[in-house]
Image (cartoon, grey):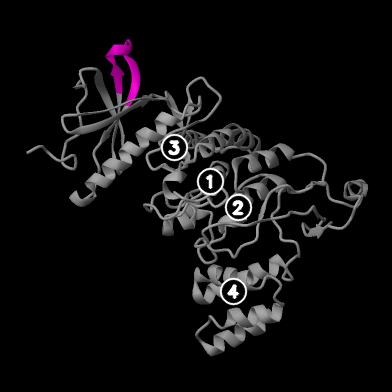
């Protein structure tokens, strides 16, 4: 009886695989297998990466499923031909083991680059992060155009090759094709891939992916946003999120402009339909940084309750908005000469592009909503965020009094609920 991949030992250095690849050393080990540096004897001992299928902690019943996932990675890599994605070279099976061969990237991961910066008391600057995003977003745009979602973006899975300037996106081991999970749906309906294996790195993957296995191109953009704030702050994601409200609190740890921070916050929106939907949208906004203050918004706005259970989105028209000196949005709809307003000297020159808004502005001040959420989180914990989202989804134009009355009902203790309302109203 052949030995199960579950119990096979690590391949030792010097071993010849498939009468071709000489193992040099172990590079890493993950849930589905081990990764080795090897030399290809048929290509003048060119360095390559050998991925061995050797799942950890998987029962015999899940072995075939894991094997299929590994083969899916080979299929995905075979489709992708991009200079910032390692080339797929081969896939073969020998002695009961499954191997995948791809291009070796001689360089450092961004987690290692960040660690090197931190030892010198520094992190990545806004200028560096902006340039990094401008170089990496086209790669995601290419991947998503091929109906593939990476699902595991983090500083560990982005590398900077030695002597080169462009980052490389690696490890598509949990990538998945959208089409496989949306058979029979029209292109307008395909937004989420549906339920899948619950994969992704905690802290980097969005809540709908970790909890429900739902993901979209916006999921990758969320993870890229988290990676960006980690590079800017040098802090773990768990230290950048409020433990009660589950809101990102990263700005105080980074020296960045308000306009850039708002773009990142838009990537980090907890509700999927409030995020950027495509990499090109983020690229457009990054390229607009520093341009004149009036921007006619072009991003699609999703008019849908903020729930990851929604199977599809509906786009509505966007309208031009303007930020005043208090960072409040003024609705400029109905003003025919909107571009002329930019000449008024009283307006603040720093504005955020592509802010998603519905046609009528909500009646509640964002600062008031945040205060209510923080107060409610004190009584009921992280569920406060979901409660408030649900109430606002049902009635975005609810009055402050009704809003407080509704959320106070979630507090089980009568006296605490009464004090809660008195404090807020």
Rendered residue at 69%/48% (across/down): 299
Q: Quick check: can you spot residue 374?
A: no
Direction from residue 252 to residue 414 in the image, left or right? left
Which residue lies under the disc numbered 1?
Answer: 217
- At label 3, counting other C-alpha atoms closer than 10 Å, the crowd grade (few under 14, some 14-19, many 20 or more) is some
Which residue lies under the disc numbered 3?
Answer: 157
Comparing labels 1 and 4, the label whose residue is closer to the camera:
1
Cα separation between marks 1 and 4? 33 Å
Query: Closer to the N terminus: mark 1 or mark 4?
Result: 1
Which residue lies under the disc numbered 2?
Answer: 275
Comparing labels 1 and 3, the label whose residue is closer to the camera:
1
Rendered residue at 64%/37% (across/down): 130
Which residue lies under the disc numbered 4?
Answer: 375
Comparing labels 4 and 3, the label whose residue is closer to the camera:
3
- At label 2, counting other C-alpha atoms closer than 10 Å, the crowd grade (few under 14, some 14-19, many 20 or more) is many
Place of residue 317 in the rendered image (x, y in percent of width and height, measured from the top left)? 73, 55
Query: Closer to the N terminus: mark 4 or mark 3?
Result: 3
The secondary structure type at the circle numbered 4 is: helix
The secondary structure type at the circle numbered 3 is: helix
Q: Quadrant of the N terminus?
A: top left
């Amino acid at each position: 009886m052949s030995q199960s991949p579950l119990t096979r030992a690590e391949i030792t250095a010097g071993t010849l695989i498939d009468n071709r690849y000489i193992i040099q050393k172990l590079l890493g080990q993950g849930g589905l297998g081990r990764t080795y540096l090897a030399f290809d004897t048929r290509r003048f001992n060119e360095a390559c990466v050998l991925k061995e299928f050797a799942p950890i902690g998987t029962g015999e019943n899940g072995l075939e499923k894991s094997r299929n996932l590994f083969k899916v990675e080979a299929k995905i890599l075979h489709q992708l031909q991009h200079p910032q994605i390692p080339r797929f070279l081969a896939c073969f099976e020998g002695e009961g083991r499954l191997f995948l061969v791809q291009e070796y990237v001689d360089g450092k991961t961004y987690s290692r680059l960040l660690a090197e910066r931190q030892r010198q008391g520094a992190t990545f600057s806004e200028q560096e992060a902006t340039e990094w995003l401008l170089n990496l977003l086209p790669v995601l745009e290419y991947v998503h155009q091929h109906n593939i979602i990476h699902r595991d973006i983090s500083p560990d899975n982005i590398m900077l090759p030695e002597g080169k300037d462009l980052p490389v996106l690696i490890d598509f081991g949990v990538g998945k094709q959208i089409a496989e999970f949306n058979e029979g749906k029209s292109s307008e309906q395909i937004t989420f891939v549906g339920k899948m294996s619950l994969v992704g790195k905690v802290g980097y993957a969005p809540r709908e992916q970790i909890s429900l296995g739902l993901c979209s191109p916006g999921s990758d953009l969320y993870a890229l946003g988290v990676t960006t704030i980690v590079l800017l702050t040098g802090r773990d994601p768990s230290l950048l999120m409020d433990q009660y409200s589950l809101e990102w609190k990263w700005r105080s740890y980074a020296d960045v402009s308000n306009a850039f921070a708002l773009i990142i916050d838009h990537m980090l929106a907890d509700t999927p339909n409030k995020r950027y939907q495509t990499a090109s949208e983020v690229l457009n906004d990054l390229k607009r940084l520093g341009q004149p203050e009036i921007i006619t918004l072009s991003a699609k706005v999703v008019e849908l309750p903020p729930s990851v259970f929604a199977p599809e989105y509906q786009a509505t028209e966007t309208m031009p908005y303007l930020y005043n000196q208090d960072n409040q949005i003024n609705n400029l709809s109905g003003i025919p000469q909107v571009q002329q307003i930019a000449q008024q000297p009283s307006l603040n020159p720093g504005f955020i592009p592509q802010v998603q808004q519905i046609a009528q502005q909500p009646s509640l001040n964002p600062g008031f909503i945040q205060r209510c959420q923080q107060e409610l989180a004190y009584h009921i914990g992280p569920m406060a965020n979901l409660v408030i989202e649900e109430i606002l989804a049902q009635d975005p134009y609810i009055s402050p009094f009704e809003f407080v009355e509704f959320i106070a009902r979630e507090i089980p203790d009568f006296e605490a609920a009464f004090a809660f309302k008195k404090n807020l109203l």
